[in-house]
Image (cartoon, helix red, strand yellow):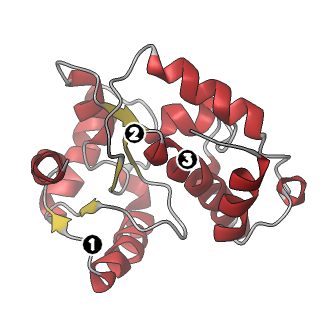
Amino acid sequence: MLADKTKFEDVLELAKMGDPSNFRLGKLDENKIKEVLEEFKGKYITHTKGFFIMAPSGAGKTYFCKNQSELHWIDGDDIWIAAGAHPDRSWWLESGETMDEIDKRSDVVTFLAKEAGYWIMGASNYWLKPDAIVIPDWDEHKRLIKYREEHDYDGGVTSDKLNQVLRHREWIMRWSEKGTPVFKTVQDAVNYLIQLK
């Protein structure tokens, strides 16, 4: 977990955020992050090695997390909102500057959660290299987004924002150039990472 104040400052430096009070969206609170990580221990299984799977909206992350038989994987939105990294609103429709700040804040929480042995999957990322990325076949991805809209909409991008999804897929794929393995499904990414634990 977080050993001391210097550790938190080191992570903020990695995020190139400096003083946490510099966030336009308010201070990212180290104590709140510690409390959330401790609270999530009562619900989720922790591991000796933490992981982060990045996938765009509509790729099946939330569905996977809600339907796992044992609670190994955390839906990133849950931990990011709880820790104060994400506002609880449709922030992905806001300015690029706001989205970048939220993604940087999310990376701080993800980094510390991985260090504490949590397995997370989400769509928010700026500087923290994911352990795996999921990019579904485009036709399948569009089908998943449409199905979610019509049957069990729980937030995220809708089919009228497919251009935004395409841009995010391109943004995520930059990690493949840095050695992050790419999978077509969340289950395939999970199976790969479980072998590495």
* Residues at marks 2 and 3, CA–CA distance in whole angstroms: 9 Å
Drawn side of residue 121 relative to residue 28, left or right: left
Q: Give the image location of residue 90, x and y in percent.
A: 60, 43
Q: Which mark is residue 197?
A: none
Residue 48, picture quadrant: top left
Relative to 62, 28 lies left or right:
right
Q: Amino acid at mark 1?
A: Thr
Q: Which residue is mark 3?
A: 112
Residue sitting at x 37%, y 30%: 153
Q: Are marks 1 and 2 in contact (CB under 8 Å)?
A: no
Q: Residues within 10 Å of mark 1 (few under 14, many from 20)?
A: some
Would you place residue 57 above or below residue 126 in this image?
Answer: above
Other residues around mark 2 within 10 Å, as few (<14) / some (14–19) / many (≥20): some
Q: What residue do we see at 19% from left, 48% from top?
A: 186
The mark closer to the camera, 3 or 1, is 3
Name the N-terminal-most of marks 3 and 1: 3
Residue at image mark 2: 117
Q: Which mark is residue 180?
A: 1
Amino acid type assigned to the residue bearing label 3 in the image:
Leu
Labels 2 and 3 touching (C-beta < 8 A): no
Q: Is residue 179 left or right of residue 93?
A: left
Secondary-structure class at tag 3 = helix
First of labels 2, 3 by sequence position: 3
Q: Quadrant of the N terminus?
A: top right
The residue tagged with tag 2: helix, strand or loop? loop
